[in-house]
């Protein structure tokens, strides 16, 4: 810069192009602008207002929850925070601020978090874009709180200004997943990191290219197997992926051959024997007499293998870089978990069940 080597472009190539608007070349970026930008600022403001130690204590004391990461050491000591860690922090941050931050600050935080999640919708219409406008307006109505408490001298931040262009960009170029750099960050793992690890780290480029070609051939071969062995139920139905099973469980149980009476006590399942009898009875003749005899009937087994968790992949509502997966945990009582951990699972039992309610579940 001292020698004016990169001092600026004085005659840009697009200056005389009739339909060029260079400002529209800068599209929104969920990863860099929202999570690594806006949300990173939010965390810093919260630590300044509440205090790093107190915020860490609140995060550490959060109960376990399905789909939530438990930061057992807090977040103040984290370095080189990844995008996935930012997303996990965004899920819990607002709940940790209740009663320790004033109402205007809570409203501003909620509005920005709403904006972050709304901006990632896979489809948009006038109604959802209206939600974006409302969330942005609510933030601007309450943002003065951060200046009043002196955690910021001003809010003239370029990434904060970029939020005002999100709605226009979505209207012009479609949803934000069309131009989000997170996709390319993820592909870097598949195409570069995994490829490099598959080599002997000497003259690696030809080896990486050869490895990638083999991976593509394996993928195409799996697709051919799917097409030839899976019979679609109807025209246009999607063929399930072979790469990820619907449910996955460990090869070996965490607690082999546990007595059923021990399971009822340690796992807080006092009626386990009765419901196990009821389940086994569904494989037999469902007569009223057999149902009434359940309470007095003896189980044919006395011991069972116990697993702490299982994983299942949810059916994606839209194309995703990685399939979403949930972990259901049933952890017994221990010194670290005096009450254990038992996740609640809602199971849909009929085709009439609604995804947004419990009817039919």
Image: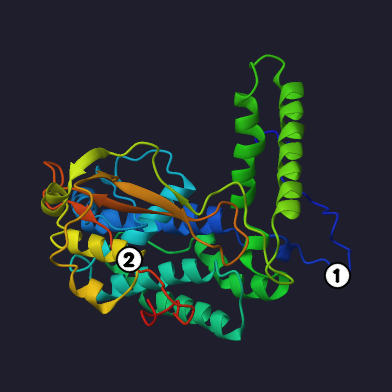
Q: Secondary structure at mark 2?
A: helix
Relative horizontal placement of residue 131, taking residue 187 as reference (left or right):
left
Residue at 35% from the left image edge and 36% from the top image edge: 252
Quadrant of the image for the N terminus? top right
What count of labels does the image hold?
Answer: 2
Cα distance between the residues tagged 2 and 1? 41 Å
Residue 349: x %, y % from top left:
41, 73
Residue beneath label 2, please? 146
Q: Secondary structure at mark 1?
A: loop
Q: Is residue 287 above or below residue 113?
A: below
Residue 164: x %, y % from top left:
56, 72
Quadrant of the image for the C terminus? bottom left
Task: Kindly indicate whether the residue at mark 1 contacts the one at mark 2 (C-beta within 8 angstroms).
Answer: no
Residue beneath label 1, please? 19
In this view of the protein, which residue sits in the foreground, 208 or 15? Answer: 208
Residue at 60% from the left image edge and 32% from the top image edge: 193
Q: Is residue 152 visible?
A: no
In this view of the protein, which residue sits in the foreground, 75 or 147? Answer: 75
Relative horizontal placement of residue 200, taking residue 150 as reference (left or right):
right
Label 1 crowd bin: few (<14), some (14–19), many (20+), radius 10 Å: few
Residue 51 is marked as none
Residue at 18% from the left image edge and 70% from the top image edge: 293
Q: Is residue 49 visible?
A: yes
In this view of the protein, which residue sits in the foreground, 246 or 278? Answer: 278
Q: Is residue 18 above or below residue 299?
A: below
In this view of the protein, which residue sits in the foreground, 197 or 3? Answer: 197
Relative horizontal placement of residue 277, taking residue 16 as reference (left or right):
left
Q: Quadrant of residue 99?
A: bottom left
Q: Earlier in the sequence, mark 2 or mark 1?
A: 1
Q: Is residue 112 above or below residue 86?
A: below
């Amino acid at each position: 810069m001292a020698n004016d080597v990169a001092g600026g472009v004085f005659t840009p190539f697009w200056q005389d192009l009739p339909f060029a608007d260079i400002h529209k070349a800068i599209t929104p970026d969920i990863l860099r602008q929202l999570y690594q930008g806006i949300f990173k600022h939010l965390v810093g403001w919260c630590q300044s207002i509440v205090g790093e130690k107190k915020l860490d204590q609140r995060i550490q004391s959060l109960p376990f929850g399905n789909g939530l990461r438990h930061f057992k050491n807090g977040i103040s000591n984290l370095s080189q925070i990844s995008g996935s860690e930012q997303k996990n922090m965004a899920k819990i941050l607002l709940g940790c601020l209740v009663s320790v931050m004033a109402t205007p600050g809570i409203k501003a935080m909620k509005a920005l978090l709403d904006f972050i999640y709304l901006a990632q919708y896979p489809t948009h219409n006038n109604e959802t874009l209206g939600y974006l406008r409302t969330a942005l307006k609510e933030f601007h109505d309450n943002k003065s709180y951060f200046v009043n408490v002196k955690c910021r001298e001003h809010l003239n931040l370029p990434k904060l200004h970029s939020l005002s262009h999100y709605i226009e960009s979505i209207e012009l170029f479609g949803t934000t997943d069309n131009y989000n750099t997170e996709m390319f960050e993820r592909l870097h793992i598949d195409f570069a990191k995994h490829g490099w690890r598959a080599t002997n780290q000497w003259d690696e480029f030809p080896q990486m290219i050869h490895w990638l070609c083999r991976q593509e051939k394996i993928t195409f071969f799996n697709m051919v197997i799917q097409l030839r062995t899976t019979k679609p139920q109807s025209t246009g139905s999607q063929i399930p992926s072979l790469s990820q099973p619907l449910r996955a469980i460990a090869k070996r149980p965490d607690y082999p051959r546990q007595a059923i009476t021990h399971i009822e006590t340690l796992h807080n399942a006092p009626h386990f024997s009765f419901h196990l009898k009821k389940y086994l009875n569904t494989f037999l003749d469902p007569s009223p007499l057999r149902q009434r005899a359940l309470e007095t009937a003896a189980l044919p087994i006395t011991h069972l293998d116990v697993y702490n968790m299982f994983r299942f992949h949810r059916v994606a509502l839209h194309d995703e870089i990685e399939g979403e997966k949930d972990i259901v945990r049933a952890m017994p009582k221990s010194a670290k978990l005096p009450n254990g951990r038992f996740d609640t699972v809602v199971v849909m039992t009929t085709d009439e069940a609604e995804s947004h309610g419990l009817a039919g579940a």
